[in-house]
Amino acid sequence: MARNIKKTVLHVCMILLSLLCLFPFLLMIVNATRTGNEIMTGFSLIPGQALQDNWETVSGYFNLFRGLGNSLLIAVCSTALTAYFSSLTAFALAVYKFKGRNVIFTGIIIFMMIPAQLGLLGFYDLVNALGLVDNYIPLIIPAIASPATVFFLRQFLMSTLSPALLEAARIDGAGEIRIFHKIVLPIMSPGIATMSIGAFIASWNSYLMPMILLTTPNKFTLPVMIASMNASQDIVANQGAIYLAVAVSVIPILIAFAFLSRYIISGISAGGVKE
């Protein structure tokens, strides 16, 4: 009886926490249908009648779908580069014993602690010298070097990969690259999926770097476009339109999480079993 009561209380608490997490999304969707004056004057969970007007306001400032496409291109490419090359680096640091391995790993940990903003001026000078200002390349290529992802995947691999599995593959004549792609990469997929969600969200929400490097309005990412509306003189009147643009910008993140969440769950289950 006492166990059932504890279970019920636990379920009720989880439901309440879930509703609390969903509440900001509900408020965002409701405010996307209200006018700026309605949003500023009072709080309400009842949808308004200004959805079409807000959409027209957004369309008057920028092309929302172009912004989505620009952000999606950068986020998908940078996430793919982060996932693959970080996995490759983590595999090398976890499996191979070579001179200087600990020094490299220590350097990765140190770079994790350095804010990216400290190198912003130097990075801009480098990009300007290479003639890559107003180009997507400097927003995508640096994703190859992701110290936090390398650190996480190395630790994940050391706890899940059996050395005997690698030795068996080598005895069968498999090369190191084939071992990585056919054996190691599938084992790392839960960890890769977890870090890919974080990398995708970070790239999708990136504002500072695209704002500095991109100068052509048609190349702006969605956060930069939304910020330009937020900085306009009609900020009060545009509140509903801003909520609408933000609501649309959240959709790709939800889709990405929906596709990758099962890998995260399987990764948690696999990490809980130690042979």
Image (tube, rainbow, N blue to C red):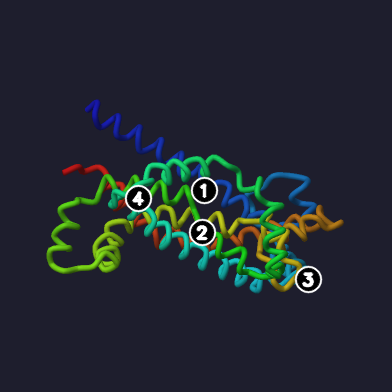
Give the residue pinned by disc 3: 60
Q: Residue 153 versus residue 32: which sits nearer the camera? A: 153
- Residue at 74% x, 44% y is 42
Give the residue pinned by disc 1: 22
> In screen coordinates, is 261 left or right of 162?
right
Q: Position of residue 181 (x, y in %)?
A: 29, 66
Say the numbered circle drawn on residue 93: 4
Image quarter where the C terminus lies is top left
What amino acid type should be assigned to the residue bearing mark 2? Phe
What amino acid type should be assigned to the residue bearing mark 4? Leu
Give the residue pinned by disc 2: 200
- Residue at 60% x, 62% y is 249
Camera-side mark, 4 or 1? 4
Camera-side mark, 4 or 3? 4
Earlier-in-chain disc, 4 versus 1: 1
Cα gap from disc 2 to disc 3, whole angstroms? 28 Å
Cα gap from disc 4 to disc 2, whole angstroms? 24 Å
Earlier-in-chain disc, 2 versus 3: 3
Image quarter where the N terminus lies is top left
Earlier-in-chain disc, 3 versus 1: 1
Q: Residue 31 versus residue 254: which sits nearer the camera? A: 254
**Marks 4 and 2: CB-CB under 8 Å?**
no
What amino acid type should be assigned to the residue bearing mark 3? Gly
Q: Secondary structure at mark 4?
A: helix
> In screen coordinates, is 206 left or right of 235?
left
